[in-house]
Amino acid sequence: MPAHRTRIQDLLSAETSGDVPGPVNVKGWVKTVRSSGGVAFVQINDGSTLADLQIVVDANCPDYSLVNALTTGCSVSADGNLQDSLGRGQKYEIAAASLELLGGADPEEYPLQKKRHTLEFLRELAHLRPRTNTFGAVARVRNAMAFGIHKFFQERGFLYIQTPIITASDAEGAGAMFRATTLDLNNLPQAGGQVDNDADFFGRPAFLTVSGQLEAEIFAQSMSDVYTFGPTFRAENSNTSRHLAEFWMVEPEVAFCDLDGLAQLAEDFLRSIFAHVLETCPEDMDFFNRFYDKELIQTLEDIANSDFERMTYTEAVAALQASGESFEYPVEWGADLQSEHERYLTERKVGRPVIVTDYPSRIKAFYMRLNSPAPGDQGETVRAMDVLVPRIGEIIGGSQREERLDVLQRRMAEAGLDDAPYWWYLDLRRYGTAPHAGFGLGFERTVQFATGMQNIRDIIAFPRTPRNAEF
RNA sequence: UCCCCUGUAGCUCAGCGGUAGAGCGGGCGGCUGUUAACCGCUAGGUCGUAGGUUCGAAUCCUACCGGGGGAGCCA
């Protein structure tokens, strides 16, 4: 009896069945059971790879009678030798010497069939859907991409930093925040006719972070090259296939870097992580290519192997106006680009990712660095960039930060912001200020793009959206 | 938050004013290596909820709740 479980991936990746001598132990969850005469076929999956393993149980196995009790969803353990499969459809199979039922799954109640389910139905079964092919593949690809992200930055000497999840500062412009409080909402302490925030846990209002950027800037102004990778929260009432109330964001922040350097970093970064996932998850990527997007792999390979298009906002507006397209929203210098405009640029105009830079200051955040005027501009612009990709639209938003104290203070005043809560942010400009830049990447959107999945709720294990926080 | 679509058996759907249906899944029985196996039999539903119109409502109307698509906000 083998002492340790062998992962299915390790068995299936063997060069020949002879490379796995002697009996092995396998464990997993039953996908389907077929029987024919005196032979039963138990197909199991253990999550280590997309492929199932077929266990052959015949009358020679003392536990043969057990197969009648096996149904989809059971967990089992089997010992036996790996052999070349006698049937078609799989290379190897296990000839069971013994079989054990670890946990049953009442077939009258177990909700997963061996047939295909809709993604909408599976969304209600977040505790069971990782057992399906699609969600197993998403979990593995998501894992590989997280690793690829760390690998990219670590190989470039970036420091992984952890910024707070609970924060008292509200990164301007990033949207509505969730309040984090220990106050009794049914009996709020009052002071001077208002809620007494001094009685709250932190002695002041606190929130769940919408971005680690401002804190990351602190470390960029000391460690030079840093990145964050963690959860962020937006209390926006957004009901789309691209928004979550809780999502993961990657935010590099780089000292002594301008917008051109940042755009290059963003491009290298995206190309690197797509190449990484193609290389490390070939079976899963084939699966997505077959069932979700027939051009997925081709698209990702193209991105990994070709340069991104660059254009300024002013050039983008000119291109949109010259396109002859009839857009629902008018295109005019000074207005933000709408989804339809972004999609035209990346999908129709260039057919690959586009980096749009130098947006009007009026539509961007106060911390973005003010430009000197360029030809064609019809107003102030800032050193901001958006990376647009087909189907998803904006996948990265970033900017060179305003490092000049006087300009920053002027911009904050124009935005109607009070200096006081930003005292430490301004201090960074008072003491050894340095040019720096950073961007934010929505992790789920990136995985969504890489898998071809239509809905972001199928990219995160336990999606938080308005009116939905089950599990 | 706005616009459009949608909610009928465990799942996917048909039925769209007159006695609630199919396929899959489940149960039972066949089948000497199967491949989302195959063949036969069978059980299973207050038609999202609450009102309203009507002799009669799954079907028409209203509100609310859930789901989907699109938009806005953004990552």
Image (spheres, coloured by chain):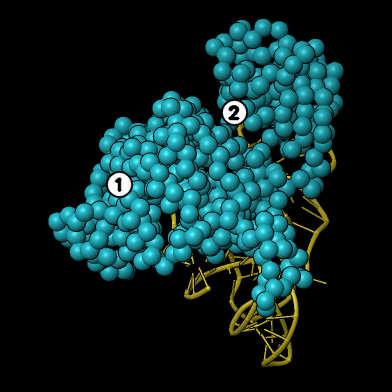
Chain colours: A cyan, B yellow
Q: Which mark is residue A355?
A: 1
A407 and A382: which is toward the camera: A407
Q: Is residue A310 above or below residue A17?
A: below
Q: Quadrant of the N terminus of chain A?
A: top right
Query: How far apart in space, not on screen, are marks 1 and 2 (Cα)?
Result: 36 Å
- Which residue is at a point 21% across and 57% down the rendered structure image? A314
Identify which amino acid the numbered label 2 is placed on: Thr
Identify which amino acid the numbered label 1 is placed on: Ile
Q: Which mark is residue A49?
A: 2
Residue A134 location, quadrant? top right
Would you say residue A441 is visible in this rendering? no
- Which residue is at a point 82% across and 24% down the rendered structure image? A100
The earlier-in-sequence mark between 1 and 2 is 2
* Left or right: B23 as drawn, with respect to A269: right
Instruction: Assign a secondary structure to mark 1.
Output: strand
Number of numbered discs:
2
Q: Which mark is residue A317?
A: none
- Which residue is at a point 57% across and 25% down the rendered structure image? A89
A162 and A342: which is toward the camera: A162
